[in-house]
Image: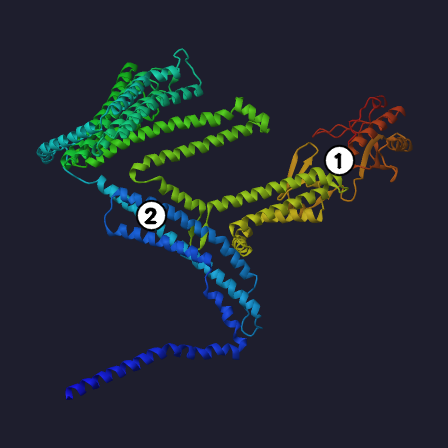
């Protein structure tokens, strides 16, 4: 009974505790609304505080567009983090690293696009925020609620775009660093494999290991061949045999018939002893294409047939591919040497070498290519049967030494030929150093390096060096041919009286010299592009790919950061194009003003020149401002640069700035104008042009005086037409002392009044100038409307005065002869009968021409 009561009490206590916990659980959710009730009721009691949350809301919200961009960036970051962890976690092969790098490139492009798209949006948001001005300081009147809300929204937009752009830039840096890390890993693996040392080719250990591995390799070879025969038996049918027969027959026909195809389609006539350079280049290009294309096509046809019939086991695909590509390679090498050296056609040769040398280079090049192909096929066999390392090392060493031997024999034959030639020519005579000597020295060095590496156990290095020597030779030969073609068909087509140049001159109006310059520039650009491609092809086997170079060029072109400054070649080029366009438009406007608008006005030439020059200044300054704005340089930054240059202006550029300011003063004050007749020092002439730094004055002898503008402002300048163009004509006439002065004065006055261009007001005047021992001198002063006619009017008046004096019987005395140094001057007057025969040698025109 007691036990029952005790159990009942425990049960009641448990039930009571559970009921209380349930009540707490039910009442706890209701306590939150009760606690929040005062908070919700607070806005009703104080409605003036309601705008505060609304103003602060934009600062915490993110637009849907920004969320999408950040989600995209988050995806890129996760992908990059995964790739970075994979690289750091284990050692990867070169193919795997290259695969990851290929996947990173589009990610970098996408991130760069996102960052570039955010830049104009961020700048626009900053400009909108700037229009509100700075926030009021403490103690100043607070801004209105609308302005505060607008400022908060714009600050939030700027912060949102700025943070997103910074995230994108950080992610771009991570991707580029990962890309660089992959490149470093690949180059490190390449170097490690290249300089890995094993047993040398003459090492007994290597030969013993090869002998021990031969039985296993023979069994593996038997298994592979058995699999190949089984695959052929299963896949063979009548249709497959027909397909293989046709493909192999076509390949043999193309390969064998290529030697007769090229001579039929590309004719190198031996009778033509001096063909043009264009003809030789076209023939070389045809020989190269027709000599290599059939072999390449035949190998491709056989491979497509084998692949379609599915008769080649996967392990033998590499062998078949090496064999077919090797046959095409041999044909290509032969066609390339035949195209450039033309062993059988001396006059069609692109490089001047002897006939025997051309034939020797052809035979040894084909032999070297054959040895290389045989080595690659054997290496493919080793890979297919998974040959042991000693066998692979021995195979590569033997073929590297064989290639080096062929190369050395070619060098020896050249040296022996030159020794024979020197023996035939007599004693040795020193000549200028040609390129053959250094090339032969380099060749012998490569041969020694290959042999030494193979003996020392660096078989990979030996094989790589000889392969690279052949590869670089092929690239250089192709580069020579392509550069010659570019020079001839780009630069040569626009040179002289070619058909293309004549057509362009007729249709575009360009001068022959301009077309030649365009041709030279185009051929130079093509040559530079070909050289860059050749360098990339040479560096490709060394682990340096085009993506490395293009990435650097892209960074230089589209912008790279130096501290807080972004330098972009594309922006600089576009800014330069904008400035050039603005400059061209300015020149067009100036030309329209000078040729069309200003001549139709009543303005004088000087004022027209000032207007045209001022328009040029305004246009150039506007173009410069537009270019600086595109570069992102504000007026504050330009002011800083100008302040930094002030020291240089104060010292080195002082005279230039002085002349520039003086030119502006000349255009504004116009003390001299275009067309004015001025006297500057010993020079006199007409002002033809007022430039930025100097003024051009054309003298009477048609020469041009270049006078700095500062000299015209600070020096003494006589302007003969400052107020008007009226000019004075001064005629000086000496007559014998016995002549009647009144009669002479009347003759001179009538001569001036008789001329139609002499002004009647002020009237001409005759002045009795002086009396000498033998003559009396008179000056006739008259005026003309235009000073340009003063010289001609002066000449006409002299003729008229001379005729009047002769008619009145008054002679003009000759000047007295200069006295001798030790003799007294003769005062004897001329005889009366000599006076009539004297000429007007004393008459001088003292007026400007």
Q: Residue at x 35, y 17 (%)?
A: 261
Visible in this render: residue 676? no
Q: Nearer the viewer, residue 756 or 74?
A: 74
- Please give the label number shown on residue 390: none
Visible in this render: residue 133? yes
- Residue indicated by mark 1: 848
> Extreme front residue here?
1
Label 1 sits on a secondary structure element that is loop
Is 261 located above or below residue 14 in the figure?
above
> Extreme top residue here?
271
Q: Quadrant of the C terminus?
A: top right
Relative to residue 163, is residue 799 drawn left or right?
Answer: right
- Residue indicated by mark 2: 179
The mark lying in front, picked from 1 and 2, is 2
Is 278 located above or below residue 383 in the figure?
above
> Extreme bottom residue here?
2
Q: Residue at x 13, y 30 (%)?
A: 222
Q: Position of residue 838 (x, y in %)?
A: 81, 23
Q: Dot 1 surroundings within 10 Å: few (below 14), some, or many (20 or more)?
A: some
């Amino acid at each position: 009974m007691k036990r029952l009561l005790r159990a009942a009490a425990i049960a009641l206590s448990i039930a009571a505790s559970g009921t209380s916990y349930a009540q707490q659980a039910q009442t706890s959710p209701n306590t939150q609304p009760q606690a929040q009730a005062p908070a919700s009721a607070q806005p009703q009691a104080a409605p003036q505080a309601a705008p505060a949350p609304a103003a602060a809301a934009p600062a915490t919200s993110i637009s849907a567009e920004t969320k999408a961009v950040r989600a995209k960036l988050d995806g890129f970051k996760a992908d990059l983090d995964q790739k970075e962890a994979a690289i750091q976690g284990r050692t990867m092969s070169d193919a795997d690293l290259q695969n990851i790098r290929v996947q990173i490139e589009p990610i970098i492009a996408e991130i760069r696009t996102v960052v570039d798209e955010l830049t104009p949006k961020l700048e626009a948001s900053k400009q909108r925020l700037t229009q509100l001005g700075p926030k009021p300081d403490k103690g100043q009147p607070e801004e209105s609620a609308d302005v505060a809300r607008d400022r908060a929204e714009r600050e939030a937009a700027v912060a949102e775009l700025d943070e997103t752009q910074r995230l994108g830039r950080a992610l771009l840096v991570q991707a580029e660093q990962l890309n660089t890390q992959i490149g470093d890993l690949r180059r490190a693996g390449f170097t490690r494999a290249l300089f890995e040392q094993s047993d040398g080719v003459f090492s007994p250990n290597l030969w013993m290991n090869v002998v021990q591995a031969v039985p296993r390799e023979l069994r593996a070879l038997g298994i592979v061949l058995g699999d190949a025969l089984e695959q052929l038996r299963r896949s063979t049918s009548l249709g497959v045999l027909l397909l293989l027969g046709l493909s192999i027959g076509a390949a043999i026909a193309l390969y064998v018939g290529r030697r007769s195809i090229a001579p039929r389609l590309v004719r190198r006539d031996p009778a033509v002893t001096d063909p043009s350079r264009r003809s030789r280049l076209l023939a070389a290009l045809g020989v190269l294409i027709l000599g290599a294309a059939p072999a390449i096509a035949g190998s491709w046809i056989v491979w497509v047939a084998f692949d379609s019939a599915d008769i080649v086991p996967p392990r033998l695909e590499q062998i078949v591919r090496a064999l077919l590509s090797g046959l095409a390679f041999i044909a290509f090498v032969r066609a390339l040497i035949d195209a450039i050296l033309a062993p059988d056609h001396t006059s069609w040769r692109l490089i001047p070498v002897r006939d025997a040398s051309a034939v020797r280079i052809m035979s040894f090049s084909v032999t070297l290519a054959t040895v290389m192909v045989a080595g690659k096929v054997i290496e493919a066999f080793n890979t297919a049967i998974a040959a042991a390392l000693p066998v692979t090392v021995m195979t590569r060493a033997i073929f590297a030494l064989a290639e080096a031997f062929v190369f050395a024999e070619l060098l020896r034959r050249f040296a022996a030929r030159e020794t024979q030639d020197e023996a035939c020519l007599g004693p040795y005579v020193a000549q200028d150093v040609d390129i053959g000597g250094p090339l032969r020295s380099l060749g012998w060095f490569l041969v020694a390096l290959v042999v030494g590496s193979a003996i020392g156990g660096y078989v990979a290095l030996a094989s790589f060096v000889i392969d690279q020597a052949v590869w670089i030779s092929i690239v250089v030969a192709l580069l020579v041919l392509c550069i010659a073609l570019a020079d001839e068909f780009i630069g040569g087509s626009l040179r002289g009286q070619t058909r293309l140049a004549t057509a362009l001159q007729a249709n575009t109006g360009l001068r022959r010299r301009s077309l030649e310059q365009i041709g030279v520039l185009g051929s130079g650009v093509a040559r530079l592009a070909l050289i860059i491609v050749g360098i990339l092809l040479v560096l490709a086997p060394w682990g340096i790919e085009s993506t490395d170079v293009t990435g650097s060029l892209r960074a230089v072109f589209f912008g790279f950061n130096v501290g807080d400054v972004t330098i972009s070649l594309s922006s600089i080029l576009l800014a330069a194009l904008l400035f050039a366009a603005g400059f061209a438009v300015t020149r067009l406007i100036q030309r329209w003003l000078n040729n069309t608008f200003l001549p139709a006005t009543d303005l004088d030439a000087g004022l027209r020149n000032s207007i045209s020059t001022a328009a040029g200044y305004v246009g150039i300054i506007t173009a410069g401002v537009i270019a600086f704005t595109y570069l992102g340089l504000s007026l504050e930054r330009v002011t800083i640069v100008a302040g930094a240059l002030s020291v240089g202006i104060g010292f080195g550029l002082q005279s230039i700035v002085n002349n520039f300011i003086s030119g502006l003063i000349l255009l504004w004050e116009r003390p001299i104008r275009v067309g004015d007749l001025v006297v500057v020092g010993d020079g006199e002439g007409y002002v033809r042009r007022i430039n930025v730094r100097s003024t051009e004055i054309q003298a009477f002898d048609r020469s041009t005086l270049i006078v700095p503008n500062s000299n015209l402002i600070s020096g003494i300048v006589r302007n003969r037409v400052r107020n008007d163009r009226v000019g004075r004509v001064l005629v000086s006439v000496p007559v014998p002392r016995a002549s009647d002065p009144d009669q002479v004065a009347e003759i001179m006055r009538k001569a001036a009044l008789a001329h139609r261009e002499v002004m009647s007001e002020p009237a001409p005047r005759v002045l009795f100038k002086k009396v000498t021992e033998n003559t009396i001198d008179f000056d006739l002063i008259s005026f003309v409307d235009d000073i340009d006619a003063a010289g001609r009017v002066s000449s006409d008046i002299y003729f008229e005065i001379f005729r009047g004096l002769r008619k009145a019987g008054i002679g003009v005395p000759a000047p007295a002869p200069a006295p001798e140094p030790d003799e007294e001057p003769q005062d004897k007057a001329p005889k009366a009968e000599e006076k009539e025969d004297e000429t007007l040698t004393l008459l001088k025109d003292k007026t400007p021409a």
